[in-house]
Image: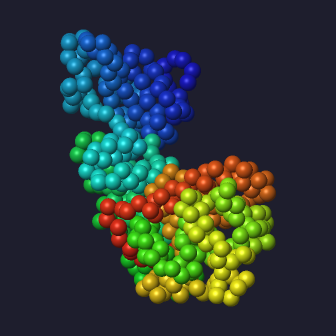
Amino acid sequence: MAGGRLTDYKIQTAKAGRHGDGRNLYLQVRGPMAKSWIFRYRDAAGFDRAVGLGPWPVVSLEEARAAALEIARMRREGRDPLAEKLARNARLEVIHAITFRDAAAKVITMRAAEWKSPKHKQQWENTLTTYVYPRLGDVDVKLIDSNHVVDVLAPIWTTKIETASRLRERIAAVLAWCAAKGFREGANPADMERLKNLLPSQKKVKESDPSKQVQHHAALAYTGMHDFMARVRERPATAARCLELCVLTGARTANAIGMRWDHVDLDHAVWKIPAAEMKISGNGEHAVPLSRQVVTLLKAQQGRDKTYVFPSQTPEKPLSNMAMLQLIDRMGHKGEVTAHGFRSTLTDWAREETTHEPDTVRLQLAHAIDSKVDAAYRRGDLYRKRAALMQDWADYIDTEPPQAVVTPIHAKRGA
């Protein structure tokens, strides 16, 4: 911002950063909705200090200047403005403003000591980064109300019910900490009691219109994948090996059962599916990076058939498209899980447990791409990232969680 003292217009148009008004008074801008006043000075020990004077426009420019003059007077008297509150008739308190992003970071650091697994920290950071920070990250916590919380939750409240519920709890926890620290006052805007009249009942959403479930692919919660895969690997059937491949690569069922040896390069750990065999052939050939676990799986399949990786009992014929579903049924998951549903499981894990980009996941699952130019760019740029995604997914499945639970969740949309 240009030099000179601040004006109302300059304040309204100020970009992120610190803008001086003179006499140690500054406007701190973190975003369009996060502007606050600070008084900066150096104490007797030579340390830089800052006193928060409150958010703009709650505290006007004139009021901030008056408060700055009062603090300057306190310092001339040898008093420490950080240790005292301004006089009541000054209509201000010496406070520190804090954004939701900064508050969340402090809460995560505080709670990290009580979490048994570092993945809890990653879960918090991933969900807040994905859903909350784009809307509220730079907002002063004292300005956040229930409508702000609804704006964050509404897009996923009825479509990603478990994620939305955990996200609400995390927002509430951050704001509760802010209240305890004196950064905000009043009721917690993320409490369910305050939101129940602003958002539909998730329970009723789950129970309503069961016919919609037919259009979806039932999926297993990613937290249960370690135990589920251990049970799959105990079974000697070819269908079990094919199911392993589906889970570990996110491949569509049709591509997995039709996997041919001449499409596999074990030396370079890649499976190249011809465009003609892809659901969306316009994307071209789909190169699937193979994790170490998949390479080991495929090597064990060598010699069973010269054409198909997962042959049926009839030579030169692939596995039946019902074989994996029948296997899942025999394992006791009839109606709860489908082979295709593991694509949704992979997507949920990547979103909630990792920092892998959504485009990386979409490309791995061979979803539609908008333009040929974009497709060519992504095929070249994201293969390395997709390989890392696949290895992380395989390693996650192989790692026994602290409390592993195989819990079927409500059906996910077809990937």
Percent across and percent down for residue 281 are 77, 69
Q: Nearer the viewer, residue 242 or 390?
A: 242
Percent across and percent down for residue 253 are 63, 76
Quarter occupied by residue 41? top left
The answer to whether residue 210 is seen in the rendering is no
Q: Is residue 310 left or right of residue 372?
A: left
Residue shown at 57%/59% (left/top)?
291
Placement of 263 over or under 171, stated as above or below: below
Percent across and percent down for residue 305 are 68, 78
The answer to whether residue 263 is seen in the rendering is yes
Q: Nearer the viewer, residue 329 or 70?
A: 329
Q: Nearer the viewer, residue 124 or 78?
A: 124
Q: Is residue 26 left or right of residue 3?
A: left
Q: Count every numbered label the image shows and give the total.
A: 0
Residue shown at 46%/71% (left/top)?
229
| Quadrant location of the N terminus in the rendered image | top right
| Quadrant location of the C terminus in the rendered image | bottom right
Q: Is residue 51 left or right of residue 311?
A: left
Residue shown at 38%/40% (left/top)?
102
Placement of 89 over or under 337, stated as above or below: above
Residue shown at 61%/66% (left/top)?
299
